[in-house]
Image: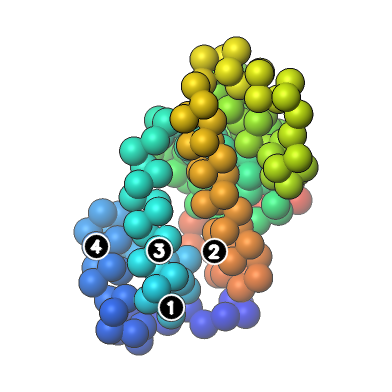
Amino acid sequence: MSRLAIPARDDVPDASKPILDTVHKQLGVVPNMFRLIAQSPLALQGFTANNGALSKTLDVKTRERIALAVAQVNGCDYCLSAHSYLGLNLAKISPEEVALNRKGGSGDAKANAAVRFAAKVVRERGHITEADIEAVRDAGFNDGQIVEIVAVTAENIFTNLLNVVAQTDIDFPVVRASNAA
């Protein structure tokens, strides 16, 4: 059971309702995490605006791969469950690739550099080396894309921390970080 309330759509502040309606139109459902955030209309507005902007960065497979790696490092079962589902069903990542992503890697050379970098940024709290930057550049990412990798990583850190704090009830097929891929 979640430690913070997961309100029904009608029980969130009025300012959050149109945003949840948009989420429902896009996804066909409103995941528990969005209803959790909706208790703060400003947090929901900021999160969805950031998420919308970042959805135009990199590509969906790379973003999902990063989300999986970050969720695994942070031990967030909610996000690991959500992004395993989204990775498999939306981004069309193979189960083998999901397992690699959870370990901080990828079978695709360019994606491997991004995922390894993102996982290291989380593990080292941003204290990475010049060699880490060069590895991402050598894989074909420019400095703007490196900023995007860090931005996607940071967005996932927010959701990871929120869902770990709240112990958000998982409304996706359950995947546990403790069950290493």
Q: Which residue is mark 4?
A: 22
Q: Secondary structure at mark 4?
A: helix
Q: Which kind of residue does numbered mark 4 sit on?
A: Thr
Q: Secondary structure at mark 2?
A: loop
The disc placed on residue 40 is 1
> Along the polypeptide, which appears first: circle 4 or circle 3?
4
Q: Residues within 10 Å of mark 3 (few under 14, many from 20)?
A: few
Q: With 159 as the anchor, is 129 left or right in this view?
A: right
Residue 35, compared with residue 108, is above or below; it is below
Residue 124, compared with residue 158, is above or below; it is above
Q: Which residue is mark 3?
A: 46
> Along the polypeptide, which appears first: circle 4 or circle 1?
4
Foreground pick, 158 / 98: 158
> Along the polypeptide, which appears first: circle 3 or circle 2?
3
Q: Which kind of residue does numbered mark 2 sit on?
A: Ile
Q: Residues within 10 Å of mark 2 (few under 14, many from 20)?
A: many
